[in-house]
Image (cartoon, rainbow, N blue to C red):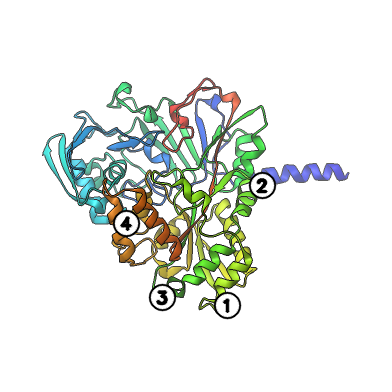
Amino acid sequence: MKRSTRRISLIMALVMMLSLFTFTTASAADGVLDVGMSIAIDSMTPFRANTGRDQYVLKLVYEQLGVFDENQVLQPWGAKGWTTEDNLNYQVEIWDNIYDSAGNHITADDVVWFITESKTRALKPCFAKVEKVEKTGDYTLAITMNQDQIGAFDTMCSDVFMVSKAAFEASADEFATSPVTTSIYALTGFQAGSTYTFAMRDNYWQAKENLPACVQFIVPNVCYHTITEASQMGIALETGVIDVAVQMDLTTAVQYVDNSAYTVEQVPGNQGWTLFFSGAESRNISSDVNLCRAICSAIWNEGLIQGLCSGYGVVMSDVCSPRHIGHNPEWDTNLYYEYSVDKAKEYLAQSNYHGEELVLLTGSSTLVSRMAQMIQAFCLQVGINIKINSVDMAQLTAIRLDGNQYDMFINTIGGTYCADHWAIRYDPNAYELGDGTARKDYTLGDMLYKTWTVSGYTQENIDAVHDYILTNGIAYGLIDPTTMCVWRNNCGLENEVKEFAGYINPACSTWSGL
């Protein structure tokens, strides 16, 4: 009787978990490749903030001027190519036969409009680096950057979506739910924060041989599923709701490492989790360096790796991931802060902290929620009280740049160069309130601007920024988890194509099970 009761309970639990999904069970055998991901996309609009900017679903909707390949080299995509002699003035040529899914012809006018509109909306700091953009021909344009910042043109290119101005302006919701696509796919189903279904269109404009390998999409029908809860991702994989899980939560992914029915791909992380301290004058922590140092010393990063990543990952020695160009290997052996309760208490005694509650802002995914709880516990043991404010993606996007809303913020920042990360987070002129936490540190700003030139991006200058950020309580790199993707072997992966972060690009890979 007891065994039967337990079995019934297990079945009921499974049914309840599956009922949380808004999609139906599927497998690759039905002709649709179902991919699970943990990041929610609430809108398909091409004008968006940096939150989720590396989400690969967007590449199935809009082509870009350029795309980073798995070696982090920018490849022309919507552009045929570009030239420059001074890293400031670029001549860009786009393909002359780009047509979107509604038959609109994309010309230089559309690209000029997109860049200009992006500058006006000021949602991404990379567009603030554009001094001017102008049409020079039907399919050519000139882009002038305001400084020869390393990687600035590359980052901007990867954020320029090939979109028809006429189609966008005719949209009732700015392509939020029904975008007109320029990729090989049409979006055939959209449920915000849930499912995104794509089918190849028969009027695609480009020849396969002209596309970078990382965006040569070959799977006819693809459905991406947002599954933020780790155990649900595992259930979806095991029951055939999804065929592939990208960037799977490590505590769930490790269960499949020695399972012959699945393949587990492990690649070094390309972002890393960083703790950002508020720079807003309204928060006392912004001027209390010793309180920030106490928090850094109180966090046991190795414990985070064991508790959150089952040992798969590395402790970050900088605010940027070790994969960023410019990372100095010497940082890894000379950590600024080592876990020490005694040292944390020493810093705390030198601070202006008197037991008040500090607000830690986070997203709502499983990993970051558990991370916040562990940091809360680590800080409590040295006498620092933390309140966790866990919000959904929409609210996080709305308040993350306003340091008046929190004392600390956990986030991941992508990019190719350390300078990319710096431009997003620490440039005091990047956003309306200052940097990414409302800080207006122009000393740091001048240091960043010095490194942004091609000639100024030296290890000496990079080290100086590294030292300044850590010693002044601006941010603290936590952990860089290993990225794990898991797929069912009965899908028959024959040829794997990888995207820029180094892990599988399911829609570009070949599957015999489809």
**Residue at the image position 64 percent from the left and 51 percent from the top:** 307
The residue tagged 1 is 355
- Disc 2 residue type? Met
* Residue 358 place in picture, x, y as percent: 53, 71
The residue tagged 2 is 16
Distance CA(mark 4)–CA(mark 2): 51 Å
The residue tagged 4 is 448
Eyeballing the image, is 217 above or below 389? above
- Please tell me whether mark 3 sits on a helix, a strand or a loop: loop
**Residue at the image position 54 percent from the left and 60 percent from the top:** 337
- Disc 1 residue type? Gly
Select label 2 or label 3 by which is in front.
3
Eyeballing the image, is 191 above or below 464? above
Distance CA(mark 1)–CA(mark 2): 42 Å
**Residue at the image position 51 percent from the left and 76 percent from the top:** 351
- Disc 3 residue type? Ser
- Please tell me whether mark 2 sits on a helix, a strand or a loop: helix
Q: Which mark is residue 282?
A: 3
Select label 4 or label 1 by which is in front.
4
